[in-house]
Image (cartoon, rainbow, N blue to C red):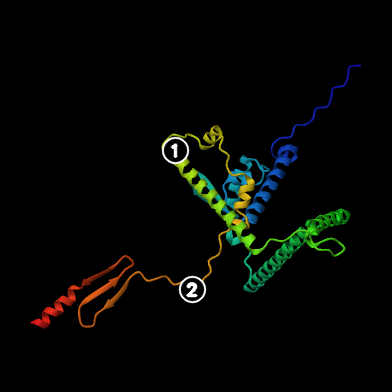
Amino acid sequence: MPPKKEAKEKPIKGNEAEEVSPVNLVASVSLTSDVQMVLNYMKEINRPYASADVVANLKNKVPKTEAVKVLATLAEKGQLLVKPYGKQLIYLYNQTLLEVLDPEEMTSLNAEIKETQRELEEKRKELKTLQTELATAESLPKTKELGKEIERVKNDNEVTLSALLPFRGDASGGQSNITPLSAEDTKKIDAEFNKWRKEWVDRRKVYKELIGLMADGGQIQSTPVFEEDQGIDLDNDKAKEVEQGEFCRPPTAIKRGGAMSKPSQVQKVSNSTGGVKRSNTAEGTSASASPADGKKKKVKKA
């Protein structure tokens, strides 16, 4: 027997094919979701954007070609407003479609915003306080380290007491073997220290001026290289520490009788009968006659 012929499927034409085709069905569903996504985004942001901005802000969830079609469709429906700006089209959500709050709702919303801002400020202050307390707690030694810290303090106390023992005398109450310095000895040491410190400061000043002159004259290209070649040793850290310490601080000026008054440099004395004014300065005494007084004398003579 000859084999049976396979039954041919009847082709679907026209509108029936569009309704049944799964490709068209998926495309329509995708387009609808893109429209809804773009519309929701434009309503939520409520700012003017171009199609490229919408695609970028949606992280390319909507292709660029689809975004252009969707925005144009929404503009035709009146849900978006469009305005040309150069070669671009700027879209904005239709403001008339937005919900308008009542004055009472606006007042309530503003009060809620102020209350939230006040609570936020209080929370920030509380957070700052807690952070300060946390930093203080973290700076303290931990419980496990307290034993070591106590031992360290005890050792420091023993070293200090052993250093003070010669000045206090022995444990039996005897006299100390070290004689403290008298006031005169202290003054002599201070005077000696001030003398050599002044010498040190003067020599350093002369050296800096000399180096500056040589550098300005072009004899020195690099000061550090010159000092290294000549074997010049600058002040070390110990000397800088002494210079910035309490021994080298300038004495505070003591004002007697309240504010210190400056001597007046010019003192003017006018003669009641004559037109001559005398001005005493620090350099000498000078007398000058004003031209106005001379005119007065001439008038009297006339």
The residue closer to the viewer here, 291 or 285, is 285
* Residue at numbered disc 1: 214
Q: Report the residue marked by disc 2.
A: 259
> Residue 141 appears at what percent x and percent y?
82, 56
Query: In the figure, is residue 189 to the left or right of 134?
Result: left
Examine the rendered structure and indicate whether residue 125 appears above or below residue 34. below
Q: For the point 60% across and 58% down, which residue is it? A: 188
Residue at the top extreme, as displayed: 1
> Which of the two residues, 279 or 125, is positioned nearer the viewer here?
279
Quadrant assignment, res 158: bottom right
Label 1 neighbourhood size at 10 Å, few (<14), some (14-19), many (20+)? some
Give percent across and percent down for residue 190: 60, 58
What quarter of the picture does the C terminus occupy? Answer: bottom left
Quick check: can you spot residue 281? yes
Q: Residue furthest left?
A: 302
Between residue 166 and residue 111, name the one nearer to us. 166
Quarter of the image for the N terminus: give it: top right
How many labels sit on residues? 2
Amino acid type, residue under disc 2 in the picture: Ala
Q: Could you tell me the amino acid type at mark 1?
A: Met
**Of the pair 292 and 258, the residue shown nearer to us:** 258
Q: Is residue 280 above or below residue 170?
A: below
The 10 Å Cα crowd at callout 2, few under 14, some 14 to 19, many 20 or more, is few
